[in-house]
Amino acid sequence: MIVGIAAVAVALLLAALNLRYGNLNQDEGWYLYAAKMVRDGKAPYADFAFTQGPVLPYVYAALYGVVERLGVAGGRLLTTGFGLLAALFAAATAWRAADRHRAAAGIAAFLLVGCNVYQSYFTTVVKTYALCSFFLMAGLFSLGFRHAAAAVAGGVLLALAAGTRLSAGIVLPIAGIWLIFRRERRLDWLWFGLGGGAVLLAVYLPSFVSAFEQTRFGLLQYHAGRDPGGLAQLLVFKAGFVSRFVQAYFLFTALALSVLCFSARESFRNPFAVLLWLCGAGISLVHLSAAFPYDDYQTIAYPILAAAGVASLLPRLPERWLSPGLALLLLVSVAGAFSSPVNMDWFVRGRDRIWWRFKEQSDLQHLRAAADIVRQSTAGNGELLTQDTYLAVEAGVSVPSGMELGPFCYYPEMPREQAEKLHLLNREMLVELLRQSAAPMAAFSGYGLAIESPAIAPVAEADAVLFNHAVQARYEKIAAMPHFGQGHTTLDLYQLKDSE
């Protein structure tokens, strides 16, 4: 009991520190801006470019009042809530899956998920991971019960996970096939399929019917178009994906190796644990197959894998080992959390030779300072010419149509007709926007006008010069804020010359 209370306290502390001090991420901007667009009556894909399932914008749109009051911090507060719920459901799922020592299994799973600072960070900053993890773990927990209603609920929740992040969709067929092979579950596979199928249709069918090409691009072509730069680089990316997963989740790695060495045969006799292992492995393989397999993708798979590992190993341990084992797990978790590079980033911007460069203020505070300048010049109700969409969200202003994807909205060679249909910008359209925008202010960090898609490469040098001249011809630079946003680049703020 004491270990469980301590675990909750540590998880809340890590979440609070990540919320206040965690580095900004460009994704936070366009996810929250997508929620704002939905709140204002727009639809993903049909009215603006979006590259994940549509569930997150609708969920956050319903709660957008928190963002309006607190800015990006409000978005982080919502995300933190979903992340902590995911950790609790991971604990509940481990409790349900373990055939002995259930309370210990639940506490251990919560420790592994909630007290991992890497997991905490990526389920605090505004991404799809926290909401998707919540739906995944709640759905798998539901499948732990032998009841038709539980099967329906499992299908609904797992379909919502797939509607939040497409890579989570692999869990639906895995769970459906597992239910078919569980004879004692009778028609649960049918109820699961009906619930999941109905929600999948409700989530995706309207978008494919009303905006097929835009939806296909956002969900499939956008991600497939990325170019890792050859086989050698692709292999390096995949090796790095595995390496960084092991680093971030070293306690789980030790747990998985222990299961493999000491209780692999017994684990296969636990059908629910088998389901969890299959689901976690399925998501991991989908992520590994991506052209750019970022290790943080695994944030949605980790709670499943942690619950699987705990449910597989802890029932095999003698009872006398449980209390000291949980206490040791708590100590190692806390030591790992507070010795991680993640929390160094709370207060440090990097290193200058032998000196650490400390932050004068947190990234969120720096963002608010920039937003204050924008609000003063736009009266809080205007348009900001920027690809740093989190600045627009914080200032409560809009961005020009076509820039909703931030740095990834620019496709230089895309035909104009296609770019207009997909709500993107080609070279000609971007230059026109820079030369003709009536936005009273412009703001560009090191990510602004710097990336071209689909390869995700630096813009051509000639394009960079062209963009710079177009901005300076229409706008006057009024301020420069160093160490801004993701990557701590310089944010240049401009005022429209015609407004003087």
Image (cartoon, rainbow, N blue to C red):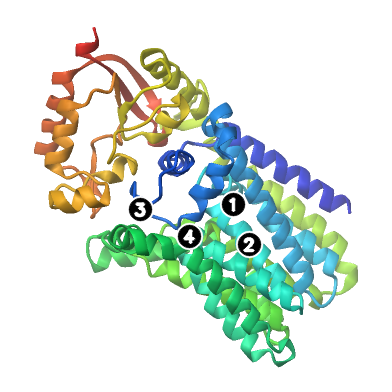
Mark 4 and mark 3: span between their CA atoms? Answer: 15 Å
Residue indicated by mark 1:
119
Mark 4 and mark 1: span between their CA atoms? Answer: 17 Å
For the N terminus, the quadrant is bottom right
**Residue 265 as seen in the image, left or right of residue 342:** right
> Label 3 is placed on what type of residue?
Tyr
Q: Is residue 37 above or below residue 282?
A: above
Q: Are marks 2 and 3 in contact (CB under 8 Å)?
A: no
> Label 1 is placed on what type of residue?
Gln
Labels 2 and 3: the sequence-earlier one: 3
Residue indicated by mark 4:
165
Residue indicated by mark 3:
45
Labels 4 and 2: the sequence-earlier one: 4
**Residue 397 as seen in the image, left or right of residue 58:** left
> Label 2 is placed on what type of residue?
Pro
Residue indicated by mark 2:
303
